[in-house]
Amino acid sequence: MGHSFIAFIVVIGILVFIHEFGHFVAARLCGVGVDVFSLGFGPKILKKKYGRTLYCLSAIPLGGYVKMVGEEPGTVIDSEEIKSSFTHKTLLKKSIIVAAGPFFNFFLAILIFYSLYQFSGIYLAKPVVGKVMDGTPALAAGVKPGDIIREINLNKIESFEDISRVVGVSKGEQLEIIVERDKKLVGIILSPVLSPGKNKFGEEIQKYVIGISGNGESFHKSLNPFQAFWQSLKDTYGLVKLTLLSVVKMVNGSISANNLGGPLMIAQMAGEQAKAGVMNFAWFIALLSVNLGIINLFPIPVLDGGHLLFFGIEAVTGKAVGDKLREKLIQFGAAMLVALMVFVFYNDIARMFYGG
């Protein structure tokens, strides 16, 4: 339990620091003064003032905040502070400051993936046929266990993942496959067929297959800096897409909202990933960083996305959202977040005590 708690504090500390540091850096670059930079909420455990900013470590490690000069509309500030006031900056600068937090979360994920790929490369499944299924196009066309698939429709095949990708988008059209068999190249022609399967969410789907499985062997591939950067962008984009799809499917009921987890689940998973090794732990931080970035961009008052929504309305109408309406919307957004926190805590407790 202690191991999980420490891992949880490390994970949350990194994610919150990166997020708030994004706001802080953007604010300073845009000429906005920062009064407080805090990791955590509540009573201040440690604090130190540098320049005008008070840097704090607070007692409740479930977030953080950056308090800027003139942050709230209607705040009365001295005339000499107007030039460093958030409210008095242009919409573009205010939007950059607000969006910088989530952006830094995405950047952290990219940086982690890049570092992992530069350090260890990637492991891919060899494009070697392990088994040919009965009654499938591969069996009818003469594909045999041990065949190494080198090319499909002039597409060079490097890994078994490449086979799945090319076959998956084939739409059932005829494929020309080159396999290596007994050190000789053999040409095979076949057409994929639709077969029932499951996607990442456990939903029943139809996908194109040729009826083979791999032999379980993998190989290591080193990546140069450009390849590592491109792969890190692809992985971060993949996590963003997967997270958004998960949210949509929870909203429409395709997958259960009981899958949502809160701090207890994160602590448990953080502990497990930390025990599994530095690379697993780093990957877990990248995953949560992407999730945090996306959640903060939801157009809910209180969150960064809510502020961006207000700025968007102001840009379109030419008028800022009224203080009273803004206050009511923020209260509504806060109530939504509290309800969500209660729900995820309930899910965590149900999993711990009832295995739900």
Image (tube, rainbow, N blue to C red):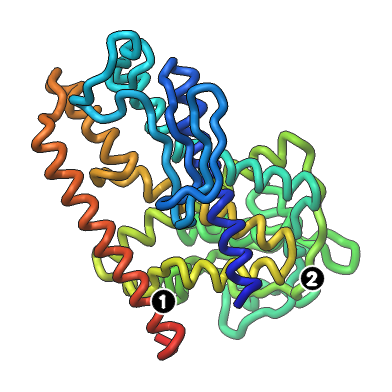
The N terminus lies in quadrant: bottom right
Secondary structure beneath dot 2 equals loop
The one nearer the camera, 205 or 39, is 39
- Mark 2 Cα within 10 Å, few/some/many (few <14, many 20+)? few
Q: Say which residue label 1 marks.
A: 348
Q: Residue at x 54, y 64 (%)?
A: 191
Name the residue: 43% across, 75% down: 202
Q: Position of residue 289 (x, y in %)?
A: 52, 50
Which residue is drawn at the image coordinates 74% and 48% (left, top)? Answer: 117
Number of dots carrying numbers: 2
Earlier in the chain: of badge 1 and badge 2, it is 2
Name the amino acid type tagged 1. Asp
From the image, state whether disc 1 or disc 2 is nearer to you: 1
Q: Image check: 5 left or right of 148?
A: left
Q: Is residue 181 left or right of residue 333?
A: right
Where's residue 195, x and y in %? Answer: 47, 74
In the displayed structure, does residue 106 sit left or right of residue 140? left
Residue 130 location (% of width, % of height): 74, 77
x 42%, y 41%: residue: 65
Mark 1–mark 2 CB contact (< 8 Å): no
What residue is disc 2 on? 217
The front one of 327 and 128 is: 327
Q: Position of residue 356 (x, y in %)?
A: 40, 85
